């Protein structure tokens, strides 16, 4: 298959590199110029649970940087950007796709499938969910740290030829592929997992195993999950609550990985909180449900995110001068 990966960071780079190793015709698109330049000059290094590989493959910062430039060519576009860039990624996919091609998203959070449908049309979109995990070790070097199931499906539940082709390509690259008749339920299951883990780690700096071993954090995780399951019940999404809760608790006990949201905070990047816990709050309010624990967690994470970005962009901020400036403005308003 001719495949383009839009968002070739930790996960996108790992999937793209492994698909290329398996013989698929893969090109990468990523907004980070240093990452793209490293891939173009020295190849993509893919390491971790699939072994150590160096893959030579096309990479560009935009669709226009890939050949041919006279129209769409990809049979499949895999969207792996973070959720803040979904609409931009969808528009990139529209430029890359051949007339009969389709796009699939493996992103975190909810709302990504809907955005792709708005930009591309429902007939050109597949749903997906990946329980793998990965990180960027350095520009041009991605590490897949955990191999979990990769679920895919047509949004209407059909078993189509294109779905089988995508499944075969992923299986050929070594992924554990599950073709789902109700892929939306799988997307929501991952959403719940992300809601119960990512922001807790990112807001505190703790890893999964540390969250599990601090009683106050373990109890807070249960309250976050209670609100998530209340939303799922209201939306009548078929998810086995007891099984999902048990799987999350077991993962937190056994693993000490750094979720992507914690990695984003530590590198002073914008997080996906609005598509995860923030989205849980919005959807709950829309249905008349309260979600105070997720609302508080979202606010705390936004505060930590803002602090990290401020420290990167303005490390020498003079708070005394800022305070004096605010005071002068207040006096001016009072005297007006």
Image: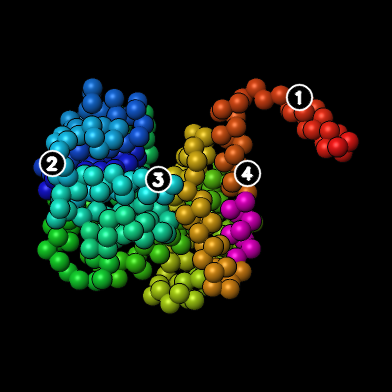
Nearer the observer: mark 4 or 1; the answer is 1
Tell me if mark 4 has few (under 14), some (14-19) or many (20+) residues whose alpha carbon lies within 10 angstroms of its own.
few
| Residue wearing tag 3 | 85
Residue ID at (30%, 66%): 183
Tell me the crowding category of disc 1: few under 14, some 14 to 19, or many 20 or more residues within 10 angstroms, Cα based: few
Whether residue 226 is visible, yes or no, is no
Provide the residue designation for mark 2.
25
Q: Position of residue 234 (x, y in %)?
A: 49, 76
Give yes or no for residue 76 being in the magenta stretch: no
- What element does badge 2 sit on? strand
Mark found first going from the N terminus, 3 or 1: 3
Q: Of the residues under marks 2 and 1, which one precedes in the sequence?
A: 2
In the rendered image, residue 283, in percent from the top left (x then y), is placed at 51, 66
- Secondary structure under tag 1 reads helix
Mark 2 neighbour density, 10 Å: few (under 14) some (14–19) many (20 or more): some
298 inside magenta stretch: yes
- Which disc is residue 303 wearing? 4
Q: Secondary structure at mark 3?
A: helix
Q: Is residue 87 left or right of residue 63?
A: right
Q: Which mark is residue 321?
A: 1
């Amino acid at each position: 298959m001719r495949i383009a990966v839009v968002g070739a960071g930790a996960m996108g780079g790992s999937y793209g590199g492994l698909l290329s190793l398996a013989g698929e015709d893969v090109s990468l698109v990523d907004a980070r110029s240093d990452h793209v330049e490293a891939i173009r000059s020295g190849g993509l290094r893919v390491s971790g649970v699939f072994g150590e590989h160096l893959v030579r493959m096309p990479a560009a910062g935009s669709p226009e940087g890939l050949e041919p430039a006279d129209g769409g060519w990809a049979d499949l576009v895999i969207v792996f950007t973070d959720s803040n860039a979904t609409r931009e990624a969808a528009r990139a996919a529209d430029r890359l796709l051949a007339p009969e091609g389709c796009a699939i998203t493996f992103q975190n959070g909810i709302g990504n499938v809907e955005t792709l449908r708005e930009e591309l049309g429902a007939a050109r979109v597949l749903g997906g969910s990946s329980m793998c995990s990965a990180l960027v070790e350095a520009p041009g070097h991605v590490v897949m740290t955990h191999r979990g199931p990769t679920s895919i499906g047509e949004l209407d539940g059909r078993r189509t030829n294109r779905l089988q082709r995508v499944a075969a390509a992923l299986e050929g690259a070594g992924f554990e592929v599950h073709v789902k008749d109700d892929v939306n339920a799988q997307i929501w299951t991952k959403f719940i997992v992300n809601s119960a883990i990512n922001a807790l780690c990112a807001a505190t700096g703790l890893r999964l195993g540390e969250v599990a071993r601090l009683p106050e954090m373990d109890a807070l995780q249960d309250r976050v999950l209670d609100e998530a399951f209340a939303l799922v019940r209201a939306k009548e999404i078929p998810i086995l609550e007891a099984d999902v809760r048990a799987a999350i608790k077991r993962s937190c006990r056994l693993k000490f990985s750094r979720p992507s949201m914690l990695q984003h905070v530590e590198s002073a990047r914008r997080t996906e909180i609005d598509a995860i816990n923030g989205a849980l709050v919005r959807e709950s309010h829309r249905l008349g449900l309260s979600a105070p624990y997720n609302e508080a967690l979202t606010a705390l994470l936004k505060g930590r995110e803002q602090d990290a970005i401020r420290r990167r962009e303005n490390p020498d901020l003079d708070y005394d001068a800022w305070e004096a400036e605010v005071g002068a403005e207040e006096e001016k308003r009072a005297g007006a």
